Image (tube, rainbow, N blue to C red):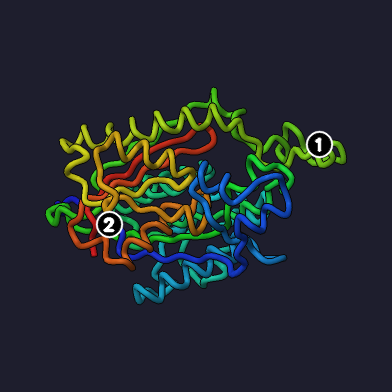
Amino acid sequence: MAAPLRSAITGVAQYHPERVVTNRDLEKLVDTSDEWIQTRTGIVKRHFVKEGQTSSDMAAKAAETLLKKTKTDPKEIDLILCATITPDMMFPATACLIQDRIGATNAWGFDIQAACSGFIYALSVANQFVRGGKHKKVLAIGVDTMSSILNMQDRNTCVLFGDGAGAALLEPVPETTGLGILDTVCHIDGSGGELLCQPAGGCKQPPSHETVDQKLHYVRQEGKQVFKFAVSEMARVSEEVLHRNDFTGKDLDLFVPHQANLRIIESTQKKLGLPDNKVVINIDKFGNTTAATLPTCLVQAADQGQLKKGDLVLLTSFGAGFTWGSVLLRWAY
C-alpha cells in the first residue's frame, strides 16, 4: 500500500502590470483624497493593466515565472486551476487560455469563481487532486483584472482594487515529512450575495443598452455590511481551522490574510494574538487584487525571508458570495 501523501506548495510567483495608479491619481477622478483612502483602507497605490492586457496575459506571465523558478517543464503540469471573477470572456475558461499560452499540453483545467476567496478554494481543490495520487504537478492561479469592472466615478469601490496575478505549484510529499497542507476549510453564505456583486452580464440581466447605461456591469458593494461580516468570519474561520488541528494563534509562524482592508487584517490579527512581524501585508502597494492577494503575499514573504521550511502558515480570505475560508500548512521549501 502506498504511503499517505500530502500536497505541498513547492514554488510561488507573481505578476503585476507596469501601470501604477496612486491615490493622488484618483483624486483627479473622484471626490476623494490620499489621506481618506489610506486612513480607511491602508492603500497607497495599485497596478492597472494597459489597454488590451487581460487576466490570461497576467496569469500566463506569473505561471511562466513560476515554471522557470521551479525548473518545471510545462509539459509536466497535470492540472491548471484558475481562480478569477474577471475571465477574458465567459467561455472558454481562462484556464484553457493559460494552458495554451504556457505550452502545458498535457494538462487539463478549469476556472474557479469564488471572488476574493478564489485562491483558497483553488488550493483546497488542488489539495484533493494531489493527495489522490494521480496528479503530480498542479498549478493554482489567482488572477483578476478588477480595473475592467470598476466604475471610476464611484469613490466607494474604485479606490479599493488593483490588477495582478499569483501562481503556486503544488506537488505530493509523503505525510511523514510533516510538510504540506494540513487542513482546509471553506464556507459560503449566499444570503449576502447582493451585498457585493456585479449585477449584469449573466443570464439574469444580459448585456443591453439599459444595463450599460445603468452601470450594472461594474462592481457594487454595500461596504459597511460587507466589512462587518468579513471582520467576523475571517477571524472565526482562522480559529476554526487552528482549533481542529490543536493549534492556537501563538503556534503560527506566519499569517497570510486577504488584502481587502487594513482594518480587517488588523482586527483578525488582534483576535489571533499575532505580532506585526507574523502578518504579511501588501495592500499598501497593490490594493485588493481579489484572487491574487494571497499568492502575491506568499511571494513577498518568501522573497523577504519570512518563510522557512517547516513554518506553520495560515492563509485566510473572505469574498463575494459570501465566500470565505482558510488553509493551514507547513511550508515545504
Mark 1, other Cα within 10 Å: few <14 / some 14–19 / many ≥20: few
Between the C-alphas of marks 2 and 1, the distance is 46 Å
| Residue beneath disc 1 | 214
x then y, percent, for residue 82: 50, 54
Q: Is residue 40 above or below residue 59?
A: above
Name the mark nearer the viewer: 2 or 1: 1
Q: Amino acid at mark 2?
A: Ala
What's the mark number on residue 298? none
Residue 253 at least partly seen: yes
x then y, percent, for residue 124: 37, 45
- Residue 221: quadrant of the picture: top right
Mark 2, other Cα within 10 Å: few <14 / some 14–19 / many ≥20: many
| Residue name at image x 55 percent, y 50 percent | 84
Q: Is residue 186 above or below residue 33?
A: above
- Residue at the extreme front of the image, as rendered: 35
- Residue at the extreme right of the image, as rendered: 209
Viewed as shown, does residue 184 lie left or right of 258? left
Residue 131 at least partly seen: no
**Total label count?**
2
| Residue name at image x 61 percent, y 48 percent | 159
- Residue at the extreme left of the image, as rendered: 176
| Nearer to the camera, 180 or 258 | 258
| Residue name at image x 48 percent, y 48 percent | 42
Q: Amino acid at mark 1?
A: Gln
x then y, percent, for residue 11: 34, 65
SS for dot 1: loop
Q: Is residue 326 above or below residue 64?
A: above
What's the mark number on residue 8? 2
Q: Is residue 259 above or below residue 331?
A: above
x then y, percent, for residue 105: 50, 69
Quarter of the C terminus within the rendering: bottom left
| Residue name at image x 17 percent, y 57 percent | 310
